[in-house]
Image (spheres, grey):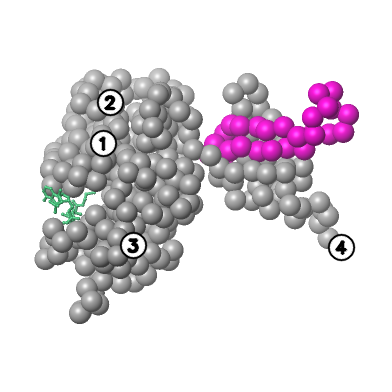
Amino acid sequence: MTGDPLRGTTGHRLTAGLTVGGRVVVRYRLQEGDESGAAATDFLGELVARNDDFLVVDTKTERVKLIRADVIAAKDVPPPASRPGRAHERVSADDLERVMAKGWQAVDQGGLGDWVLRAAEGFTGRANSALVVGDPSLPVDKAIDFVERWYADRGLPPLFQVHGPAGSDLAAAPAAAALLERGYTVGGGREQWERVLVMTGLSAAVPPLTEQSVPVTADAELKLEWLMTYGEQRTIVPGVTEAVLTGSEGQLFLSVSDPQSRRIIALARMAIHPGWAGIFGLWVHPDHRHEGLGSTIVSAVAMVARENNMPAIYLQVSADNTAGVAFWRSLGFTVHHEYAYLARPAS
Ligand SMILES: CC(C)(COP(=O)(O)OP(=O)(O)OC[C@H]1O[C@@H](n2cnc3c(N)ncnc32)[C@H](O)[C@@H]1OP(=O)(O)O)[C@@H](O)C(=O)NCCC(=O)NCCS
């Protein structure tokens, strides 16, 4: 027999799907003779590492090393509540940004302290910007130097995503002030990058599908027709776009097809997280707007979310897309916080 006979235990299976870097709860068998007399205890915290035999979890008070074979139950959990409110309101902006970054993963990703550096050959601002969140572990100016070099090494312009409370002056955030001094501007000359709203809502508050709703297809796989239709409204980077669209822990590709032509006339991508669903790329063919297709797709997302223990939904929409913002408001979504991209103006 080769290998360790303990590998492949129930504990290994239960912990195989946990997200490293995510928040987890682990029920753990205590060794016999534990002075408390308890048979098991729970650890809640960030899963910082996993190898064949151990998990390392940073709890609020300590770093613990757990033997995977002694895990009785384990699951990913949503970020903690940081303020009063309902499921979609009580998460902090920093934590929600971290969740959303996992919903749209770059193909090339690095870290600088808590900052997340993302590159994907220029496909979308989100996947090609430094997410300014938490502590970069260096003084801000040195952190910016590092990020600029990181993007220069990849032949990409440096781009920073900076967030703040709804309605706040994003240029006043500490990293933003340092960037403005270097000649960066909010939006870098693109209106849609000047103010992006992060809107959230309760999956239970979205109107349900009815018998009159048009059929919505939800596919775990990215199909060519979905990708081609998506590519009709934005520039795609072959290979990279597919990798970003399919790069999260879980995602669904939703679409509505025209019953006559059978062509896709509305689509969206749903990202799946512990406790949260994300909606990306919602689009309805211009000839079919105001027919209820957009809201039907959101109702379908909300149904999947409700059935899979995701009480909260997020999405990101540029503030200059007034029709888009009105659409989300009509479905009960409200602004959680805002972000902007800071870039050097294109020469
Ligand atoms: C935004 C979009 C998805 C809406 O899809 P749709 O199928 O036309 O929307 P619905 O018919 O389901 O509309 C539902 C409600 O949203 C609101 N709404 C939709 N379009 C609106 C507009 N242009 N202006 C103001 N409100 C609007 C209305 O309250 C509407 O209800 P009503 O028809 O009873 O008035 C569609 O316009 C679109 O694809 N836009 C381009 C891409 C985009 O902006 N996506 C969203 C950004 S993330």
Which numbered mark, 4 or 2, is in the foreground of this view?
2
Q: Amino acid at mark 1?
A: Thr
Which residue is disc 3 drawn over? 254
Q: Please say whether residue 44 is visible from this viewpoint.
A: yes
The alpha-carbon separation of the residues under discs 4 and 2 comes to 58 Å
User: Which numbered tag is attached to residue 165?
Assistant: 2
Which numbered mark, 1 or 3, is in the foreground of this view?
1
State the SS at label 1.
strand
The alpha-carbon separation of the residues under discs 3 and 4 comes to 46 Å
Which residue is disc 4 drawn over? 1
Name the residue rendered at 40%, 66% in the picture.
219
Location of residue 178 by image quarter: top left
Q: Does the magenta segment cover residue 61?
A: no
Above-or-below relation of 64 to 101:
above
- Say few, some or many: other residues with alpha carbon within 10 Å of mark 2 (under 14 / 14 to 19 / 20 or more): some
Q: Are marks 1 and 4 in contact (CB under 8 Å)?
A: no
State the SS at label 3.
strand
Q: Which residues are magenta?
A: 20-47
